[in-house]
Amino acid sequence: MLNLFDPLLSDLAQTRIDLAPGRYGLLTACDGGLLEVSGLAAPVGALCKVAHGSGPPLTAEVIGFRNGRTLMMLLGDTVMLRPGARVRAEGRPGLLPVGETFLGRAVDGEGLPIDDRGPIHAQAAWPAGGLRTGALDRSPVRTCFDTGVRALNALTTFGIGQRIGIMAGSGVGKSVLLDMIATGAEAEVVVVGLIGERAREVSDFVERHMAGDKRARTAVVAVPADHAPNLRLRGAMLATSLAEHFRAQGRQVLLIMDSLTRVAHAAREIALLLGEPGAARGYPPSALASVTKLVERAGNSAASGGSITGLYTVLADGDNQDDPVVDTARSILDGHVVLSRDLAQRGQYPAIDIAASLSRVMADIVPPEHAALAREFRALSASYEANRDLVLMGAYRAGADPRLDRAIAMHEALAGFLSQPARSVVPLARSVAELTGLLGDGG
């Protein structure tokens, strides 16, 4: 029985006693979630407690300061706030809790458990913005990453330490493909950030992937869509900080972020509250910059030998592939997978548009024979799609284009190769062997 108190006693023994006089400020304004506090000089990123009557204090985060006032945003609702409420700073500004204790657990954006398995006693801390390193401190991608998805393994082969985006409109299958990769991929540590998504998806993901042997190497940070924007942004930074902490120990980490667009939406809400003008279709520059900063933290580390393979979903609002977030993510990521609504409506799952998908490191990590087969598959698929209407109308005359003739003859086989049942796993070696057999038989 006494062993249950060991973690608590250990935390108390290592806690430094602050003998400085307590300082507090007063709440002077609340405007659309933006709080103004006078008399409290706290740095940006600091967490504060706002007292309101006899209830438990509310938590707010400092997001700026102006005209002698500190600007804050609550990590919850503004209900029950009143003018003159006392605000006190707490914790260590700019640092997030990390450590082994997060493995096997599901937490919120503050690092507090949501899985009813007791408190988390984190001893280590990591900068919320990460540790910036030089460009040459990142080792190149040289080893293939097995996703467990046949089409991705064979045609857009990814590497360990690569940053990959899954781009599609709503309801096309981003989360399902992400679930397939999380099931089939092999990594020492898996960190999952479910940011701004449906609460139902959070419970479903935890139920599927936090069971058995997988639990001991998986950490989940979940901040559903109904939470405050700064808490959503904080959740994304916490997931990335956890991945960086494990990479610094030399481990191979898979970081899954669903979704990068919700992170940009959260950063946009905060920037607009601070008065920053919208530039690219309503997105302030700092909102798009937050996406770039978050993605750049993944990759290989030459110092520790560890790696973070980043997998990010990107929502294309209105199926617009020129959306600012999609365009920014595509320009900074090392590869992207585009899902097509047309293919999904034809019953092809996962609905991967091979012609629009790309892995920028594939040519450096696969044998030339594999790369040549992938190019041939792409050419056949693109030729059929470009002439699909003519073929269906019967307007195409056989023999006019030998490549198109072969594409028509192999269409069913090509579509079958791209399709794969959900939660099934096709390893990398088997994917390449099936591609070789397909194009060899088709020749």
Image (cartoon, rainbow, N blue to C red):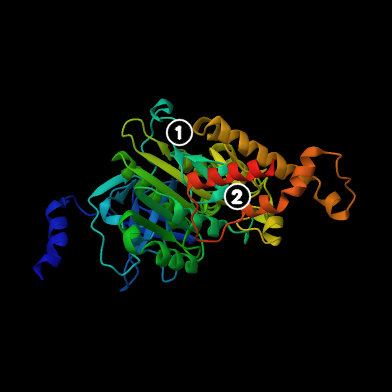
Question: Is 25 on the left or on the right of 288, as rendered?
Answer: left
Q: Give the number of the mark in front: 2 or 1.
A: 1
Whether residue 69 is situated above or below residue 172 in the rendered picture: above
Q: Which mark is residue 115?
A: none
The N terminus lies in quadrant: bottom left
Q: Which mark is residue 167?
A: 2
Residue 353 point in image, percent of width and height: 66, 48
Q: 15 or 124: nearer the eye? A: 124
Could you say whether the residue bearing mark 1 is in a helix, strand or loop? Answer: loop
The C terminus lies in quadrant: top right
The three-letter amino acid code for the residue at tag 2 is Met
Whether residue 352 is situated above or below residue 359 in the rendered picture: below
In which quadrant of the rendered view does residue 83 lie?
bottom left
Mark 1, Cα crowd under 10 Å, few <14 / some 14-19 / many 20+, is some
Question: Is 35 on the left or on the right of 413, as rendered?
Answer: left
Q: Distance from label 2 to label 1 (Cα)?
A: 22 Å
**Residue pointed to by mark 1:** 141
| Name of the residue lying farthest toward the bottom | 54
The three-letter amino acid code for the residue at tag 1 is Val
Residue positioned 54% across, 44% down in the render: 433
